[in-house]
Image (tube, rainbow, N blue to C red):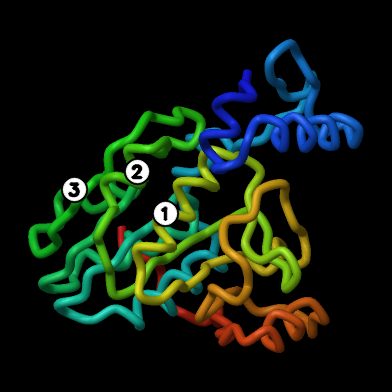
Amino acid sequence: MLTVRDAAWTVGANEVTVRRDLMALASNGLITRTRGGAVLPRGFSREKVSNEQGTRPTPELVAIAIEAASLIASGDSIILGAGRATVALARELNDVENLTVVTNSLLVCEVLANAPAIELMLTGGSLRRTTMTLVGPSVEQSLHGFQATVAFLSGEGLTAQHGLSISDLTVATAERAIAAAGSRVVVLVERAKIGHPHLCQVVPSTSIEMLITGSGPADDELSRIAEAGVRVRIASTDCPPARP
């Protein structure tokens, strides 16, 4: 259950505004109102389970990860958010020398734990077991004053109007803190997720420097994203396999 007080603290709004927004969400069937807060409707799942997050990446994710890894150089400091795409990117970093990686994803940590040339830093936070991600105010506190070379984010949807979005409020809040700690924001999203907004915005399109996505047919939404000022890179699947 999400209480009105917790929601107000998380988004930095007053409780009157939160109650109004919860009523609007309930009217659209996205939540069920309860005394003092809200819960998800019966049968509605908002998060992918952790074993899906940790599965072997698809060819598209491998291609996206390889393209993203080409942006990283020795001596960089990067932040990796949660998601399958960032885990795939982590698999491409084991041979990068003198690299600092900060993350709130335990799955990223698992991939990089034995990489001797990488300084690996895990944020604080409470564990969201369904995604194996750390969330909560400790994430923001861990990143306070931190300025990485680039922040890599994944997500569940991307549109020009709504930017990068996911369906979990607490994860979205943590991902916003990660974006704020990067000098540049690069978004890694599969092609099928473009054009499909979700409930919680992570960052608007204007805050995204680059999008790396998979190949596909001409897409009007992708064109609108580019027109919003986002540099778009299409990752080819004609790439070598991901590193183990």
Mark 2 / mark 1, whichever is N-terminal: 2
- Residue type, label 1: Ala
The image quadrant of residue 134 is top left
- Residue 113 tag number: 3
The image quadrant of residue 241 is bottom left
Dot 1 lies on which element? helix
Mark 2 / mark 3, whichever is N-terminal: 3
Query: Seen in the image, is 15 located left or right of residue 25?
Result: left
1 and 3 marks in contact (CB < 8 Å): no
Residue at 70% in and 80% down? 225
25 and 216: which is toward the camera: 25
Measured from the top left, where is residue 103 in percent x and y? Answer: 31, 52
Dot 3 lies on which element? loop
- Residue type, label 2: Val
Residue at 32% in and 61% down? 79
Residue at 45% in and 46% down? 174
2 and 1 marks in contact (CB < 8 Å): yes
Measured from the top left, where is residue 56 in percent x and y? Answer: 46, 51
Measured from the top left, where is residue 186 in percent x and y? Answer: 47, 73
Instruction: Provide the residue designation for mark 2.
Output: 139
| Within-10-Å neighbours for mark 3: few <14, some 14–19, many 20+ | some
2 and 3 marks in contact (CB < 8 Å): no
219 and 17: which is toward the camera: 17
Q: How many marks?
A: 3
CA–CA distance in space, label 1 to label 3 = 23 Å
Measured from the top left, where is residue 207 in percent x and y? Answer: 54, 73
Above or below 34: residue 174: below
- Residue 177 tag number: 1
User: Quick one: quadrant of the N terminus?
Assistant: top right
Mark 1 / mark 3, whichever is N-terminal: 3
